Image: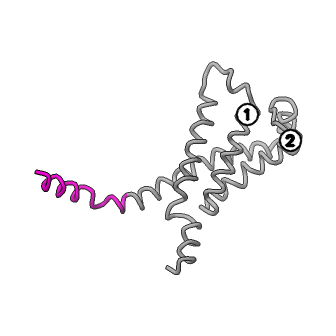
Amino acid sequence: MMKMILGLHQQFSRFDANLTEWGGSLLNLALRFYVGSQFFKAGMIKVGDWATTLALFHDEYKVPVLPPELAAWMGAGGELLFPVLLFAGLFTRQAALGLLAVNVMAVISYPVLFSYDCPAALNDHLYWGLLLLVLAAFGPGRFSVDEVIEEKRAGK
């Protein structure tokens, strides 16, 4: 009986490695573009109306330690630079952790998120944070500049 179970298991799992490698790579590509686009759009909105962005950082957002102008530049810069790195799959883990820091700072500096009757805004930040942690933990996958560099480094 055990031999039959082992044989069935071997048959059903023979494509697991390919599915993990290629399916996981496609999933990571989708995650990189989804989460990156969310932050890139926010960065474009910030630079599109810089006066309003500065006013928000002066009046609404309470970024600890940093002056509002510097916080605005760093926030917009992170929302524009890190997604581009994610899209390319270049320095993917570092870009994901950088966006995670931007995401955490956004939640910390805007306490109104915790007082909404509808928790969707806070949940979005939670989901983005989890997706960024997945990218940081598992990397960009095969469809990335990081992978091309690693293959060249390994002499493949």
Identified at 63% across, 30% down, the residue is 122
- Tell me if residue 4 is in the magenta stretch: yes
Amino acid type, label 2? Leu
Residue 125 percent location from the top left of the image: 63, 36
3D distance between C-alphas at marks 1 and 2: 13 Å
Residue 81 has which mark? none
Which residues make up the magenta segment?
1-19
Please tell me which residue lies in front, 22 or 42.
22
Q: Is residue 7 magenta?
A: yes
Residue 19: x, y in percent? 36, 58
Q: In the rendered view, does 80 fall on the left or right side of 152?
A: right
Q: To which residue does mark 1 refer?
A: 108
- Furthest residue toward left: 1
Type of amino acid under label 1: Ile
* Residue at image location 57% in from the left, 47% down from the top: 133
Question: Which residue is denoted by mark 2 in the rendering?
Answer: 66
Q: Identify the image quadrant of residue 13.
A: bottom left
Residue 123 at x, y percent in the picture: 59, 32
SS at mark 2 in the image = loop
Looking at the image, do the residues carrying marks 1 and 2 touch, with CB atoms under 8 Å apart?
A: no
| Residue 86, placed above or below residue 38 | below
Q: Residue at x 54, y 68 (%)?
A: 147
**First in sequence: mark 1 vs mark 2:** 2
Drawn side of residue 75 relative to residue 120, left or right: right
Considering the numbered disc 1 on the image, is that residue within a helix, a strand or a loop?
helix
